[in-house]
Image (cartoon, rainbow, N blue to C red):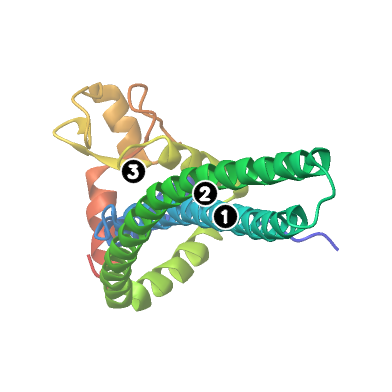
Amino acid sequence: MAKKTIEISVEEKLRALYDLQIIDSRLDEIRNTRGELPIEVEDLEIEIEGLEKRAEKFDAEIKEQNNEINTKNEVINHAKSLIEKYKGQQDNVRNNKEFEALGKEIEYQDLEIQLSEKRIKEYSAKIEHKTEMYNELVAKIEELKQHLVFKKEELEGLVAETQKEEEYLLEKSKEFASKIDERLLKSYQRIRDNSANGLAVVGLERGAPKGSFFMVPPQKQMEIAQRKKIIIDEHSGKILVDDDLVNEEMERMKEIIKF
């Protein structure tokens, strides 16, 4: 069985919209008290993550260079043992040809040692440079993490102060939104999303929509006061309501929220 739609008057729709605007504006106020803190926390987390990845890369490169040094040290040790072996064999050669052949082997192994020692110096220089950069990164990460803890505590403190009220208002926002038909609610949300201050429904102040300098013609002001149709301001794109409705709903909503 299809759900029966309850028809309400335009005036009731306008009141429901303005009530919802009051609630949503209070929610905006609460969130604005947090300022840029949520963005600052998120930016710090992203920066720390990026620096940690760089630090991991440096750490991996340092380990790789150390492995290369270990490999070259093995080459040196092996070459030294071969030199000792060849020198011992030279003492027992039968002719000059064998002596010279062993001499060339000794010379070759000596070159291997020199080349390995050169590479070790190069790797050591790289390790020293990368270690310095790694330590700077680690110090920077630690500094940012401490700052992040401070910012998170600051944000959590602000959230804790208003969490109960925010949760209550979110429930009220859903409750009041449920009283408005889907098409009109979508229009309200769209206007709010496109508004810098989050206002979708505004009253008139000295003949102009709140926050606007464009006067509404007297004839249209009369139509707004009659509450017979939804009127959109042609300049700001906001839904317009009359001052009496604004004052009545502000007074009525004092029982529901604090503002």
Residue 28, image quadrant: bottom left
Who is closer to the viewer here, 22 or 146?
A: 146
Q: The disc labelled 2 sits on which kind of residue?
A: Ile
Q: Earlier in the sequence, mark 1 or mark 3?
A: 1
Separation (CA) of disc 1 from disc 2? 5 Å
Residue 256 at least partly seen? no
| 34 vs 255: above or below | above
User: Where is mark 1, residue-wise?
Assistant: 69
Q: Earlier in the sequence, mark 3 or mark 2?
A: 2
Residue 137, image quadrant: bottom left
Q: Secondary structure at mark 1?
A: helix
Answer with left or right where residue 105 lies relative to residue 243. right
User: Where is mark 2, residue-wise?
Assistant: 120
User: Where is mark 3, residue-wise?
Assistant: 199
Q: Disc 1 vs disc 3: which is toward the camera?
A: 1
Answer with left or right where residue 13 lies relative to residue 152. right
Separation (CA) of disc 3 from disc 2? 69 Å
Q: Secondary structure at mark 3?
A: loop
Residue 19, image x and y in percent? 37, 57
Separation (CA) of disc 1 from disc 3? 67 Å
Badge 3: residue crowd in 10 Å (few <14, some 14–19, many ≥20): many
Who is closer to the viewer here, 225 or 160?
A: 160
Image quarter hosting the N terminus: bottom right
Image quarter hosting the C terminus: bottom left
| 55 vs 162: above or below | above
Q: Earlier in the sequence, mark 1 or mark 2?
A: 1
Task: Identify the disc placed on residue 96.
Answer: none
